[in-house]
Amino acid sequence: MKILRGIPISSGLVAGKVTIIKSISYATFQKSIKKSEVEKHISMFKQSIKKSLEELQLLFSFMESDAKDAREIILSHQEMLKDKVFHDEIISIINDELVEAEFAIHSFFEKLINDFSKIEDNYLSQRKEDFRDIKDRIIKNLSQNSTRNFHSIPKNKITVIDNISVSFMFEAKNSNVLGIIAKNGTANSHSAIIAKSLDIPVVFEVKDALVEMKNNDFILLNGNTGTVIVSPSDEKISEFQKNKKKEKRLYLGKLKLAKLPTSTKNNQRIQIMSNIEIPDEAKKIEVKNSDGIGLFRTEFLYYIENKFPTTERQYKFYRDLIKFYSENKPIYIRTFDIGGDKLSNEFGLAKELNPYLGCRGIRFSLRFPKIFKDQIKAILRAGAFGNLKIMLPMITSKNEIIRAKKIINDVKFELKKSKMKFDENIEIGIMIEVPAAAIQSEQLADVSDFFSIGTNDLTQYILAADRDNETLAESFNYFHPAVLQLIEISINAAKKRNIPISICGEMAGDEIAVPLLLGMGLKCFSISKENYLNIKDDISNYELDILRKKYTKIKRKSQIEIFQFYKKIMKETKETKGL
């Protein structure tokens, strides 16, 4: 028996046989070409880029929406592949040095990776992994055969690999592996982000993995602790099985709870809705049992085709969503929230240095009303068959809502004229995700049927901290008193004007933040399916009156004090249940 240790990346316990996989590295040699062959190699390079983009687009279209970080990684790879400066660099190397496309790509990326290796920075370290992955993808697609980076990954085995990569993680996602062990890899890498979405145990940095394990070895993998036991003793197997049974028992208990209405310890009803992006997700048990779909992100419809879909295409998506989910439960459709950075070339917008502050959300919809009208027409028509609601993102003023409503009324008039069936009384609400909207929430409530607080954007705008900037990770914190104050203002405004309010950002699925939000008076949460069972279980252990008193007592304290206070509440609640 041998015990190996690494970095735990994705939790879970699994026992099984090992399969060793070695990633294919492309041996690239400098080979000169004639001047007459230059155009051929430039054409091969461009075709490879096209093929690589198509692969990534297909991959993107099959990903579930709660794997948001993984989807962002694909988008970043696509951006690199589309970059004109990168294209020009490769073409220059082929032209000037008279070398094959394969070697030009290899030398460009190796120089880039080498330059980044000289800088000690976690973020840049993960970029090196991306560069290697992009390089391998392009070189692979230069070949007419376009063979995969990896041999076929066997099902129902624990995969052990030397060098982890983004491509491997995506391939593993669709291969039904039991678990993954990597000799290398870091906790903050893009591979680690994708690993967390796989729902299987994953451990990185197991340095002796390929030395101490061979094909078909029986092992115990603990993704919670990062421990690997090779050829375990009977005692270790028995202990492992007990822990596995305990984990399963807890999960089944929560699954049973999923089918019951969500209520607090003293039987006060709380609504938990789901955030989704693909109609198929509505079939999942956690989503099916939720009180509604509090956020349907329609950007997926653009990304799946790399263009804005037609009214008919969108209509079919929304009808499918109602069919898969429910004709009666509410479904909040957020209109397109795509940044101008993704659309600058297509729509002639100025290059945006900060897309979060650019032409996105309602700004884009009002600037390009034809796209907005097509989407509204599809939502209104599908709404005749279910309980759809229109949610407008990035609202900063009353005037934006009034202008959007006028366009919606124009679409209604056109549908009436065409004698098409549609929902004449559809509700129209807004996202509270900009400080301006939170501050004037009382006035905005006068022209809104509901509010939904988007805490991700709201937090970054209030604290001037880019949520994607790892250097500012500590600054991006929704426990900051300023963030809490604007959330409370919005909740009170909705209550005063008697309109529903929910919260749909990451904060809604944070077990530490939930008792705080309940204490503020929030009674509707919209979360990803991976958080559904835990949040539902947590809420059943709280009493609202007690939480309100606790919030009143702590609300004037510092960010650290507030966070520690609610962390303690969450911990004590779980200890009471024996978790």
Image (cartoon, rainbow, N blue to C red):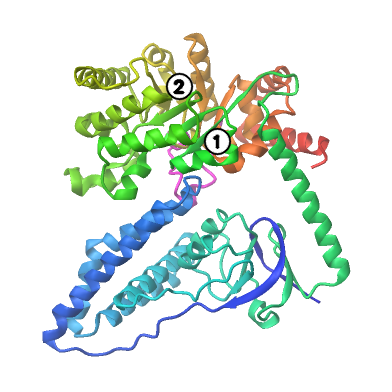
Q: Of the residues shown, which amino acid type is indicated by label 2?
A: Phe
Residue contact between numbered discs 1 and 2, judged by CB atoms under 8 Å: no
Circle 2: is it few (<14), some (14-19), or many (20+) Cα within 10 Å? many
What segment is highlighted magenta in the picture? 458-481
Where residue 481 appears, as percent x and y from the top left, is 56, 29
The residue closer to the viewer here, 122 or 544, is 544
Measured along the vertical axis of the image, is residue 78 above or below residue 109?
above
The residue closer to the viewer here, 229 or 446, is 229
Q: Quadrant of residue 541?
A: top right
Read off the residue under disc 2: 451
Q: Tag on residue 527?
A: 1
Number of marks drawn: 2
Circle 1: is it few (<14), some (14-19), or many (20+) Cα within 10 Å? many
Measured along the vertical axis of the image, is residue 86 above or below residue 502?
below
Quarter of the image with the C terminus in it? top right
At horizontal 39% and vertical 16% (from top left) the residue drawn is 448
Q: Of the residues shown, which amino acid type is indicated by label 1?
A: Ile
Q: Earlier in the sequence, mark 1 or mark 2?
A: 2
Measured along the vertical axis of the image, is residue 450 above or below residue 508?
above
Where residue 307 appears, as percent x and y from the top left, is 26, 46
At horizontal 47% and vertical 64% (from top left) the residue drawn is 166
384 within the magenta span: no
Where residue 177 appears, as percent x and y from the top left, is 60, 64
462 within the magenta span: yes
Q: Residue furthest left?
A: 36
Left or right of 280 on screen, residue 303: left
Q: Quadrant of residue 386?
A: top left
Left or right of 497 on screen, residue 394: left
